[in-house]
Image (cartoon, rainbow, N blue to C red):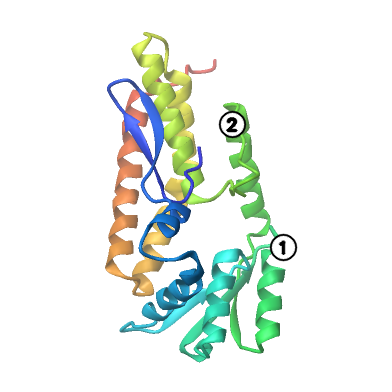
Amino acid sequence: MGVVAGSALVFDLAHWSRSVQTWFDLPSHVAHGDREPAQLGALVQDAVSARLVADRPVGLLLSGGVDSSLILSVLAHQGLTEQVTCFTGDAGKSDDARYAKACIAQLGIRADNLPLDYGSAGMEATEELVRFYDFFGLSLSEGQREEPDHLLTELEFLHYLAYQEAGLASAGESTEGVLRAQHDFIARHPGAWIPVLHSRLMVHGAPRFYIELVRLLERFLRAEEARLAGQIKPSPAIH
């Protein structure tokens, strides 16, 4: 389940339900707030300029999508492109990289290209993710362009499995299948690459907030994998 911008996903553990609540609506804020819609451009420019005030070099990951392209256009309009290092990458999964290159060429600025070649192993992992989702009758939202290997997608899938586990347990039914699915999914996907992400954040001196956030996620995945392993019944021996 995707969560749209300005909204929050709320879980009611007492009734095992979930709902989406909107905490910020930009059109309403602009229409009824102190700002006029005509000032939106100036607000965006102010927001971009404010984020250039930093104690370390500032980078822009230019994906070719609307958000990063808008930020780049503001930088170019204000003549500030030299204060930012642009990064692009092409994983061969969408047309966004082509749009990013077109922006770079149009402005005549330099950008560092990051190699994002998943290779055959990466494609096999992505295909396996889709098979996991399909097995439980789930599909990715085409409207929101969700990626099967995005961290949010993988964590939402784990939430879905945990929700199914709780429902089966409360109904007095067997949870063996969904327990195995959770354990295998963690071991083969987020539990396999989150530790690598954590170590790379440490090596590259990422902000401590992100390092600690990923460390906490890694600890949770390890604990959950251990819990599931302890609840799964051993497979019968084959004679």
Quarter assignment of residue 9: top left
Identify which residue, 1 or 22, lies in the foreground.
22
Q: Secondary structure at mark 1?
A: loop
Q: Report x, y in % for residue 99.
A: 69, 70
Q: Is residue 24 visible?
A: yes
Identify which residue, 201 or 81, lies in the foreground.
81
Taking the view exactly as shown, the residue that stands out farthest to the top is 172
Tell me the residue at 59%/72% (across/down): 69
Q: Which three-letter amino acid code belongs to the residue tagged 1? A: Asp
Tell me the residue at 45%/31% (across/down): 160
Give the label on residue 134, or none. Answer: none
Q: Secondary structure at mark 2?
A: loop
Check the image and report above or below for 93 versus 53.
above
The reply to whether dot 1 and dot 2 touch (C-beta < 8 Å) is no
Q: Is residue 189 visible?
A: no
Left or right, 212 with respect to 62, comes to left
Q: Report x, y in % for residue 81.
A: 53, 87
- What is the quadrant of the C terminus in the image? top right
Quarter assignment of residue 127: top right
Identify which residue, 46 or 94, lies in the foreground.
46
Identify which residue, 108 or 177, lies in the foreground.
108
What residue is shown with label 2?
138
Dot 2 alpha-carbon crowd within 10 angstroms: few under 14, some 14 to 19, many 20 or more: some
CA gap, disc 1 to disc 2?
25 Å
What residue is shown with label 1?
95
The mark nearer the N terminus, 1 or 2, is 1
Q: Which three-letter amino acid code belongs to the residue tagged 2? A: Leu
Q: Report x, y in % for residue 121.
A: 63, 53
